[in-house]
Amino acid sequence: MNILVTGGAGFIGSNFVKHILERKGNRDKIIILDALTYAGNLDNLSEYLNKDNIIVPDEQVSLEAFRWNLESELAEMPSFERDSARLSFKLFGRDYLAAKTEQMEEAASKSLEDSQLVFVAANISDQRIAKQLLKLADVVVNFAAETHVDRSILNPDQFIKTDVYGTYILLEAARESKKLIKFVHVSTDEVYGAAHEKSFSESDPINPRNPYSASKAAADRLVYAYNQTYGLPINIVRPSNNFGPYQYPEKLIPVMILKALREEQLPVYGNGKQIRDWLYVRDTAKAIELVLEKGSIGEVYNIAGGNEKENIWIVHSILNHLNKPSSLIKYVKDRPGHDVRYSLDDSKIRKELGYSETATLEERLQETVEWYVKNQNWWEKILKNDQEYKEFMEKWYGER
């Protein structure tokens, strides 16, 4: 199959791509559509990328949203008036391909002849590109989203544009496709809101309580509506808190690991007793693969880690793994509308599709800590060069 993975350069998306490509005897091909905003990172997929399978639409090459440091070669780029769908050029010292927007289908198809993967650097909200790539796809897995609650509190606008409108554009393109087998939408446990006495099952009402979860809930229900109204073959998955390698360093676990490694103060919201269910990212990838292959059309599936822990437990575990003192912990002002507990009942995916996790939380957390220790170059590049990241961290935590 040709699998279109939106947001495939992000944390969960890139781990899903690796999971698919690493399967024994894999013959599927992957088309990634990613706008490379702050959490999208080509380094997450570096072993699969080369000068012949990264494509940038010609009119978007110079967009600041891609955050590339454009070199002087840009001024000497061709005018794109030639008939060829693909033209080579250099950006930031690497070779890429530029393609006319209206010829993206042709350019991506040609790359797939010689590669298992093609990467298209564009936004899911670009209707022209979405339509062309959907013509090539047998299935879609939609990871593309703004995902950080803290950022959504500061700037809800982009969350609505990407999570809601972007999903709408993809659904419209999917509705026009003549070969689409399934559209899998990646939602979140946060659409349910705070859990109290019990864990949420798929039949429970949703009750989002912050701009991020509200935008994801809107997209979640829009996907379901396209199934009910137009018969679009969809599944929706709602995973709990993911962790693992390649997670952008503004979420709890990578923030705490990197600050501990640098012996900086670890900011813990409130009393640190907020409870989350922790799910290893490769288990999420495995679960989504099961839904893709076996999930009943129109169904929603929760994906839980079965690891409900207080945030402060996670922080102390990280410090213990790194042999760092608990005196590094600094309790800071809690964020507005902070849900105390998230909890999922995922018996449906376990019983119907045979899902199970692969290791304990303690084992996976230790592996994750060790990954960040061994991959300093990956995260140092973000800490040193990503101005948007610096500004967010200073603004959000500086005020606490």
Image (cartoon, rainbow, N blue to C red):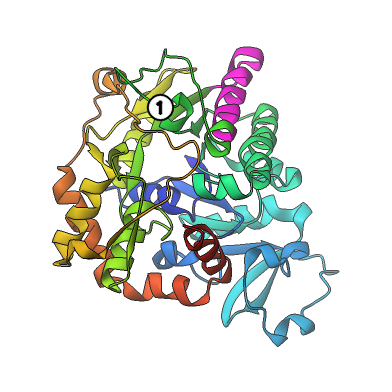
Q: Is residue 8 above or below residue 82?
A: above
What residue do we see at 14% from left, 50% from top? 363
Q: Position of residue 310 (x, y in %)?
A: 25, 40
| Image quadrant in which you'd find residue 318 | bottom left
| Image quadrant in which you'd find residue 379 | bottom left
Q: Nearer the viewer, residue 127 or 143?
A: 143
Q: Secondary structure beneath disc 1?
A: loop
Magenta extent: 215-233
Q: Is residue 266 magenta?
A: no
Query: Which residue is the site of mark 1?
Result: 194
Q: Is residue 144 left or right of residue 367?
A: right
Secondary structure mostly taken by the magenta-highlighted segment of the chain? helix
**Amino acid type, label 1:** Ala
Res. 249 in view:
yes
Q: Is residue 19 left or right of residue 73?
A: left
| Image quadrant in which you'd find residue 120 | bottom right
Q: Nearer the viewer, residue 277 or 29?
A: 277
What residue do we see at 21% from left, 36% from top? 357
Q: Position of residue 344 (x, y in %)?
A: 32, 25
Q: Position of residue 106 (x, y in %)?
A: 68, 53
Q: Is residue 187 above or below residue 39?
A: above
